[in-house]
Image (cartoon, rainbow, N blue to C red):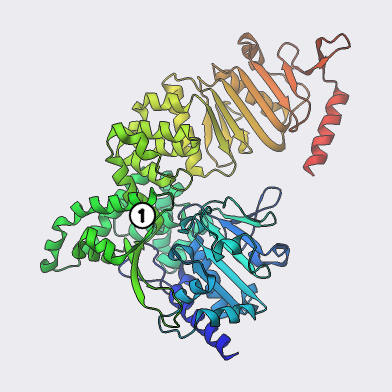
Amino acid sequence: MAYKQLFVRELKERYKQLCAAIHPTPFVGDTLHCVDKVFVDGGIEYLAESWVPLGSYHLLFHESHLKSNRKILIGQPGFGKSTLAIRYANDWCNGVQGSYLKNVEILVLLQLRKLGGVASIYTAIKRSLSTRSQLTDNDIESIIQSSSSVVFILDGFDEYPHTESSPKTDVMKIILSEMFQQFEVILTTRYLPKRYPSETLQYRLTGFDERAQDEYITKAVVENDEIVAGRMKMLLQENPIIQEICQVPLFCTMFVHLSQKNKDLQTFSTLTSFFENTMTYFQMNVRSKVGDKTLHKYCTFDESDVELDKIAFEGLSKDNQQIVWKKQELIERLGEDVYDQYLRIGILAEDEIMEHGDRSSYPCQSEASFCHKIFCEWYAARHLAKCDPKKLNEVLRLVNLLDLQYCFRFACGLNRDMAGKVIEFVKKRGGEKVAILCFLELGSMAEDAVDTVKDLCRGKIQFDEEDSKLLHRSTVQLLEIASSKNISISYVELNKCYSTIDLTCKSHLQLKSNLCLPVLVTLRYLAINGDGKEINAEEFAAILQYSSKCRAMQVLWLTDHVLPHTVQAESVSILRSRRATVMWCPKTGYQRYQLNLQSCQWQHTYKSLSGRNEKRVMTFDDYQRVVAKCRQKRN
C-alpha cells in the first residue's frame, strides 16, 4: 500500500509539472500557462452510424461510452490532442468534480514519442517519473497489476518510434487489447493504426469553431478585457483566411497571442506567409532581448537554419520517423551557440530522459525535439523547397502524404515555381484534397498556374460535410479560376454539404459551411448528395436554372433528396437543347429516375417482357410511396 501511495504521489507530481508548463506558442515572453487557462472544452465528435457531437470532453468516460474500454481519439495536426491528454491528467490530479477520473486509482499518461527503444510498459512508466524516484520496474508492475481501476492515455501514436511491423512492444499489445484488457485505454493519433480491436470506439477533434475562438481569446489572452477581446474578434471576422486557419487550435493560439505585438500577422493570405512571418518574429524577438556581446552569435544563425532544415527532413523522411534527437547529436551538427538560440526561441525543447535497464536508479540523458511536429514539418519543407527539380519526385516519395500534409503545403508556398510538380505528385498519390490546399498556398500566383488548375480539374472534385471551411474555400477558389480561364471542370460532387440556393438570381449554391459555389460555366457534371432534405418545387426549379447557367453542364444528379413530382421551369428548355441529363435517386440503392425534359415528369427505365428497355412515367401514387419510404428511413 505504501508503494502505491508513493507511486500515485510521484505520478501527480509529474503531471502537475506538465499541467503548469503549457506553451500556447513557442515564444510568448517566456510565459508558461496552466492547462486550466488555455484549455477550451468542445469540438469532439464520436462515431456512431455517423459522426455525432460529444458535447464535452468529460463525456468520453460517460456510461454510454463504456461499452468498450479501448478508445481512439483522432485529431489533425495542431488540434490539441496533447493538451486534452494533459487536461485529463489535471482532472485526475485535482479530483475535479463531475469527472469520471476523480474515482480512478491510477492514471498513466505516456508521450509515445519519448519511448524509442523501450519495449516494456513498466520501463516506460518508470522513465516518466522524476529522476529521483526509487521505484523499480518490478515495483510498478506489482502496483499496476494489483490495482482495480487504471486509465492509460497513450499520447501521439503517429509519433511513436516503433512501426506496427516491428516486434511487438507492450504499447502495441495494449492497443491491440492483448494486454491490460481490464483497463481503460485512450490512444491519441493523427490517423488510425493499421490494426486495432473491432470494438474500439472512435472519437475525433473538430477544432475551434467561432465560439471556441471567442472563449480562448477571453480566457487565455485578454483576461476578460472586453475591449481588447472585441478588437481581436474583429480581426478574425475581417479576414476569412485568418478565421479559417484559426480553426486549427495551434494556429489560433499563435495568432491571437502574437498579432497583438506583430501587426504584419493580421494581413497574411496563406498559411505559409503566416508561418514565415511568425518564425521571423520569434527570431527577432529573441535578438532584441540579448546584449551586444551575444548578438554576434546570430551571424551564422540563419545559415544554420539550413542544417536544421536538413535534420528535420531526414527525421521525417524515414520509414520510422525520427522526431526526437540526442542533445549532443544536435549540438554537433548545429553548434552549441546555435542550438542554445533555438532553445531560447522555443523552436526546440529539451527533456531529461532516463536510460532503461535493470537498476532501480537510471542514468539520465538529454533529448531534444521540435516544440510541435508542425514546426518540424516547416523546417523539412524548407529543405524540400530547395530540392533539385530533377530529383524532386524521388525526394517526395520519402515523405508520408498521410501524415505530413503541412510539409507539402509549406513547400508549395515556399517555392511556387516547384508547386505544380508537388501538386501533381500529391494528386497522383490519392491526395486530391491536400493538393487543393497546396494550391491555396500559391496565393496571388494561383491565377497564373493554368497547367496545375487543368490537372486538378481533370478528375472528381469533392466537397464533404466534414471538410474544413478552409478546404471548401480553397476548392471554390480553384473552381472559380478554372471557370474564368475556360478550363473544363469534369466532375463536382457535394456530399451532405449542400444547404440551399439563392432563389433571387439563381447564381450560386450555398454550402453548409456558409460559402457559395458560383455558376461555373465549364462544369460538366454536378452531383448533389444529400441527407434526406426535402426540396420544394421553387428550390428545385432554381437548381435547374443554376445548372442551365453552367453552360457546359451535361449531367445533374441528385441523391438522397426528396424532390417534387413535377417541375415547371424555363431553364428546362435550355437543358433540353443541350441534351443534358437530370437524374434523381431518392435514396442510395433505390430506383433511379430521369427527368423527361419534354414533359417535365420523372421516368425510369425497365426491361419489358420482350427484353427491350422501356421508359415508364412515375405516377403520383408511385411518387407518394417513394417519398413515404424516404421519410420513414430518415425518421
The N terminus, quarter of image: bottom right
Q: Residues within 10 Å of mark 1 (few under 14, many from 20)?
A: some
Q: Amino acid at mark 1?
A: Phe
The residue identified by callout 1 is 375
The C terminus, quarter of image: top right
Residue at 38 percent across and 46 percent down: it is 407
Q: Is residue 15 left or right of residue 271?
A: right
Q: Considering only vertical position in the picture, is 407 above or below 254?
A: above
Q: Considering only vertical position in the picture, is 606 above or below 353?
A: above
Q: Is residue 64 left or right of residue 301?
A: right
Residue at 73 percent across and 19 percent down: it is 594
As rendered, which of 414 and 119 lies closer to the eye? Answer: 119
Percent of width and height locating residue 148? 67, 78
Looking at the rendering, which quadrant does residue 500 occupy? top right
Residue at 28 percent across and 50 percent down: it is 310
Q: Is residue 446 left or right of residue 200?
A: left
Q: Could you tell me if residue 287 is visible in this image? A: yes
Percent of width and height locating residue 193? 56, 52
Residue at 55 percent across and 41 percent down: it is 514
Judged from the image, the secondary structure of the residue bearing numbered disc 1 is helix
